[in-house]
């Protein structure tokens, strides 16, 4: 029993290091621990393909990926950020192709788990809502429609782990 508690504490401490969920309570983190799975992927792997159906999203624990729309680099996705959430939030096709440019550790959530993530921790729902709003707003300003994986201010983006391509 003691070993199981230690293991749960270790997993909760690991979750607490992910900026997206760092503000959650211990009880919320224990609920999140049952969701998704951690996955290590090599550099060069496609996480999403623009236009495809969105079946899962990816919370970046470690590593870096590029986001492209119409073969144009629109941003970088790094630790603490999320990719693939727009398709799940809006039940629309993927809005960008995301490719790992370094080895990555990801927390992968399917659509049901993503919904549970937002229900278990209201703070995460607010953060994901702000990220989605920033991405929508940025894309409207830049392209007049659709969605983007970048936001407005470098400090906000760095905090979220997303750096817009135009500021690299």
Image (cartoon, grey):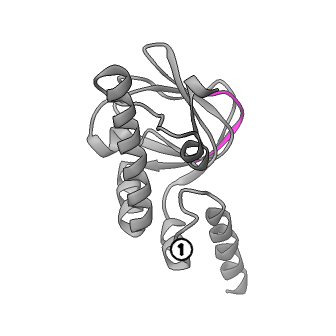
Return the x and y of residue 22 as percentages of the image width and height. Answer: 58, 64
Residue positioned 38% across, 43% down in the render? 132
Label the magenta part by its dominant secondary structure.
strand
Does residue 124 sit above or below 75 in this rendering? below
* Residue position for label 1: 30
Residue 138 sits inside the magenta stretch: no
Q: Report x, y in % for residue 26.
A: 56, 77
Residue in view at x 42 percent, y 14 percent: 70
Q: Helix, strand or loop at disc 1?
A: helix
Disc count in the image? 1
Q: Position of residue 103 (x, y in %)?
A: 71, 35
Whether 71 is drawn above or below 80: the answer is above
Task: Judge from the rendering whether residue 27 lies leftward or rightward of residue 79; answer left or right.
Answer: left
Neighbour tally class for label 1: few under 14, some 14-19, many 20 plus, Cα within 10 Å:
some
Visible residue check, residue 116: yes
Q: Quadrant of residue 64?
A: top right
Residue at the spot x=42%, y=52% of the render?
Answer: 128
> Residue 76, image x and y in percent?
58, 31
**Quadrant where the C terminus is found in the figure:** top right
Q: For this view, does 93 lie left or right of residue 107?
A: left
Segment tinted magenta in the rendering: 99-106
Q: Nearer the viewer, residue 70 or 54?
A: 70
């Amino acid at each position: 029993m003691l070993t199981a508690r230690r293991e749960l504490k270790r997993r909760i401490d690991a979750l607490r290091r992910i900026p997206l969920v760092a503000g959650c309570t211990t009880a919320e983190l224990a609920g999140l621990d049952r969701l998704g799975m951690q996955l290590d992927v090599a550099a060069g792997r496609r996480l999403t393909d623009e236009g495809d159906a969105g079946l899962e999203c990816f919370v970046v624990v470690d590593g870096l990926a590029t986001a492209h729309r119409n073969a144009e680099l629109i941003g970088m996705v790094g630790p603490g950020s999320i990719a693939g959430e727009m398709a799940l939030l809006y039940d629309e096709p993927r809005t960008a192709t995301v490719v790992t440019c370094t080895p990555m550790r990801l927390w992968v959530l399917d659509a049901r788990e993503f919904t549970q993530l937002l229900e278990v921790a209201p703070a995460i729902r607010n953060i994901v809502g702000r990220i989605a709003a920033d991405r929508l707003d940025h894309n409207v300003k830049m392209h007049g429609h659709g969605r983007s994986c970048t936001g407005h201010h470098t400090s906000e983006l760095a905090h979220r782990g997303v750096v817009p391509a135009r500021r690299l």
